[in-house]
Image (spheres, helix red, strand yellow):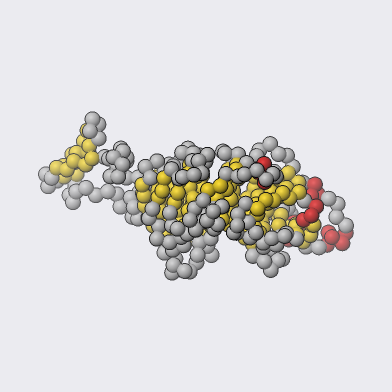
Amino acid sequence: MRVLTSTNIADSSWVTGCDYLTQLKRVVAVTERTVVVWDYKSQGSCQDNCFIIKPMEHCLLCVCTVNLGDQLAKDDILMGDDGGHVNLFTVTSDDFGLKQSKAKKKSQLQILDSRKFKNIKRKLHDDWVVKVKFISALNCFGSCSLDSVHSFVLDDLKRLEDNLPVREFSVPRGVNAFTYCGKANIIVTGGDDKVLRLWHPNINTKPVGKLLGHLFSVMEIVTNEKDQHIISLSTAKVFRVWDIQTLSLLQIFHDSQGKAGEMQIYAMIFDNNHGTLITGSSVIDIYPLTRMIQDTKQVPQTHERNINVLAYNRAFHQVLTICAESIVKVSINLHPLTGRKKNVAVAFITDKLLSN
């Protein structure tokens, strides 16, 4: 987790989002009024490698890269703004490889006119667009807003270029965050009404399931694709881990750093390659995934004394144990809510591996 390189953006506005441009191999970030493209690998001063694209008509709030895999020397960027628009912004290698005059070469930042870039936008929400993502498995983009009517939109990129109806999902008090589970083919949304809703991507009239339990607004949701778990985060810094197949709660844990209103967590991702949950506030925290029970590192305790005999009855899915006090116990290996067979000791950890 060491820092490879960094740069300071010479802009008084907040940086509201960033992503990686897979084709151009650069970082794109958005501030309230500008788009920043940073060539972080170039030699020399990092500030010499920043391009500032401005002006933008509305305040930019989120950004993501469209990964189509068939584009060369260009990247499409999705951006959401405070006017309820979703923008499809295209940048190419030619945009940043033009010959500069000597005067411009001495400049730390190179300013580019936004009107020279291809930008398609469409108003899809009646409130701020708080998150936008491109879901490669569905070949669709998703955007969410606090708008109670046009809360979540999931559709093809072509809809940004025309005025045809879009596939939109309505949620009371809007949607703050959403995620997609590819194995289950389920979209999960969460917002200020504290309810996680599960949707089939092609059915926007009614959710296929609901997950209840959060006491505060849901701000972030990520997917553990391997285990088909959903991890949700509330404004009280409380994490909940859900089994998307059984619709059951596996674990609750919280970030103990500071009080509830302090060190607010602004971002959360799940690294499926390493099985780790990563959160960002004023620090970066990593929560490793492991086989543990609830909020402790304790293994399940069945007896007070040493177990001398252990047997498993496959026919009835029962575990027989006898301890040193000659106490015999039979444990049924069934999920308590659904009756489905389930491992007794599968959950998510809470201890942090690293705070830096």
Please report the residue visible at 43 percent of the width from the left and 69 percent of the height from the top: 259
The front one of 278 and 324 is 278
Quadrant of the image occupied by residue 320: top left
Q: Is residue 161 visible?
A: yes
173, above or below 345, in the image: below
Q: Is residue 2 left or right of residue 229?
A: right
Residue 109 quadrant: bottom right
Relative side of 178 to 100, left or right: left
x, y percentage for residue 268?
A: 51, 55
| Residue 86: x %, y % from top left | 65, 52
Q: Which residue is drawn at 88% across and 59% down?
A: 102
Q: Count the numbered circles shown.
A: 0
Q: Where is residue 177 in the image (x, y as percent from the top left)?
A: 52, 53
Looking at the image, residue 11 lies above or below residue 65: below
| Left or right side of 59 for 170 | left
Toward the top, the furthest residue is 315
Q: Where is residue 93 in the image (x, y as percent from the top left)?
A: 77, 46
Q: In which quarter of the image is the N terminus?
A: bottom right
Q: In this view, does 51 lie above or below 330?
A: below
- In front: 238, or 303? 238
